[in-house]
Each structure stands twice: as structure tokens, then as C-alpha cells.
Image (cartoon, helix red, strand yellow):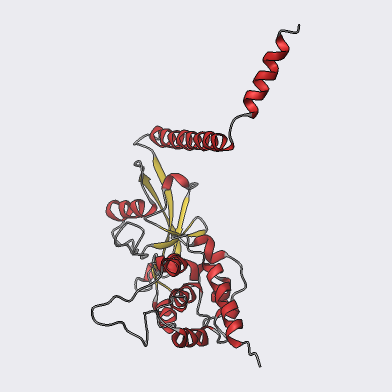
Amino acid sequence: MSTQVPDQVEDESSAESVSPGKQKRDAKKRERAKRVQEQREAEAAEKARSADDTYHLKVFRYDPEVEDKQEPRFDDFYVPYKQGMTVLDALMWARDHYDSSLTFRHSCRQAICGSDALFVNGSQRLGCKTQLSDLAEPVRVEPLPHTDVVKDLVVDMEHFYDQMEAVEPYFQTNSLPAEDEEQRQTRENREKVKMSTRCIWCSACMSSCNIAAGDNEYLGPAAINKAYRFAMDEREGEDMKQRRLEILEQEHGVWRCQTQFSCTEVCPKDIPLTEHIQELKREAIKNNLKFW
């Protein structure tokens, strides 16, 4: 009976002697192994889908120039599935094999041009970035809400571009360096504005914003984020920052935001749009504070 007690004590002592660092490393290893396993399971599930399987797409159709297409409707397309197929791939297949009049915007197919923003299964998404395998059927593809439809999935972007231009989305400064010097920026300041520079002008955030839907003059999250990118850039100087804050403090500027986070949720580049808007609100308040 007594011979087992020292062994138990030794085992407990050994377990207690494991360093926090080793425990942390072991936890990371387990987490990595879990991620690898999940990825393998996802790949296996995708490969299990036969090449003969199809995805059912319900695509919004509208053409004001064709009499029998002036009434909006949905057309059904059954697209043969291939591993890695995106919504954009499926639309291109449907256009090339079923209906050459199917109209939508696309360009680079690398999720950086922002031209193929769509309303897919009730959410704003980039067609080239959205995997069919992540969506429930039928896959419902519509133009961006709260915008005028030009034809099928193409919407009028003129108003969005006007709002972006309203915040003067370009670098301005009154103090330029000497000809042989660079316009230097600290690492800390670059990190501060880094996420805001990722905007690809897709208008997904603007389309998701309930305030923009009801207020046509509201600058919108994309334009305010673009203003943030320059207002927080230390190279422009306080005088230019003051000018940008005056643009944002207007009635249809940052104060119209109701912090619903819808813009942040749909941003394909994961920009913390709502946080940027709230920070600009704080800057606007500090800008109007007087001490005397």
C-alpha cells in the first residue's frame, strides 16, 4: 500500500513543475493541429462533391431597354460545380453557357478591384471572394440594395463616387520636404491608418447602411473612412486635419452614424469602419473644445 504513495506524489509534482511557457507552447500546438484537421475535413467535403453536381442560382434580372424584361424577375441557373468555384465563376459560366445577356461587373477576380460587389443570400459580398461551397442553395444573387439598378446586377455608382470625392480623398500638405528627401511617416502612424488604406471602393458598406438608405446626403462609411485615412495621417499637418474635420462635422457627416456596425460586418477587407467613425467623432469634439 505504501509503495504507491510516493509514485503519486512524484507524478503530481512532475505535473506541477511544467513551466507556463511549455503549457502555452503545447496549447498552440493543439490549436494548430485542430486548425489543420478542420481544413482537411473541409477540403475532403469539397472533393466529395461530384464534378457532375450543380449549384442552383437564382439571379435577379432587369433590363429597362427590353420590353419583356422591364419587370424585375429572378432566373434560375444550374451551374456545374468545380472545386474552388466562386459566385463570380458561377455567374460567368451561366452567362457563357445559358444567357449571354446576363450582365454584371467584374475585373481582376482577386478581391482588390471592388467591381463585383453583390447581394448574395441576403448579405453584401464580393462575387470573386465568395465560395459557392460556403452558401446554402438556392444561391440568391441580387444587385446591391439602396442603389439604382442599371441592368441585371449592375448598379449606378455615380452617387457613391460623388460622396467619396466630397471628402477630398487625396494627400494634401503645406510643408513639403526638400527635393532629395522623402515625406517621412512614423511606423506608429502608419499602423494607425493602415487598415483604412485597404478600401477598394466596392460600396458594400454604403449599401448595408440604413442611414445612407434614408439620407441621400449622408457621406457614408466608405467616404468617412477615406477621410479618416488622411485626417489621421501626421504628414498633412494640423491645418489640413482641421479642414477635414470641418467637412466631417457637417449635418450629414459623422454625427449621422448610429453605430449599427452593419458596414463593418460586410466590409470584404475587414476595415473597422465603425471604429474609425467613432474616433472621428471624438476628434470633432476635441476640435471644438475651448479652454480659457
Which image quarter: residue 115?
Answer: bottom left
Front-lying residue, 208 or 264? 264
Q: Residue at the spot x=60%, y=87% of the render? A: 288
Asked if residue 24 is positioned above or below residue 162 in the image, the reply reads: above
Tell me the quarter of the image containing the C terminus.
Answer: bottom right
Pick out the residue farthest to the bottom. Answer: 292
Q: Nearer the viewer, residue 174 or 147?
A: 174
**x, y percent for residue 285:** 61, 82
Question: Residue 117, image x and y in percent?
Answer: 41, 63
Judged left or right of residue 258, residue 166 is left
* Image location (x, y in percent) of residue 131: 41, 48
Residue lying at the far left in this picture: please name it.
Answer: 180
Left or right of 105 in this view: 125:
right
Q: In the displayed structure, does residue 285 sit left or right of residue 179?
A: right
Give residue 81's position: percent from left, percent from top.
36, 42
Residue 140 appears in the figure? yes
Q: Quadrant of the N terminus?
A: top right
- Residue 205 vertical placement versus 160 (above, below): above
Q: Is residue 203 visible?
A: no
Toward the right, the furthest residue is: 1
Q: Residue at x 35, y 41 (%)?
A: 83
Which residue is drawn at the image coordinates 54% and 34% (left, top)? 22
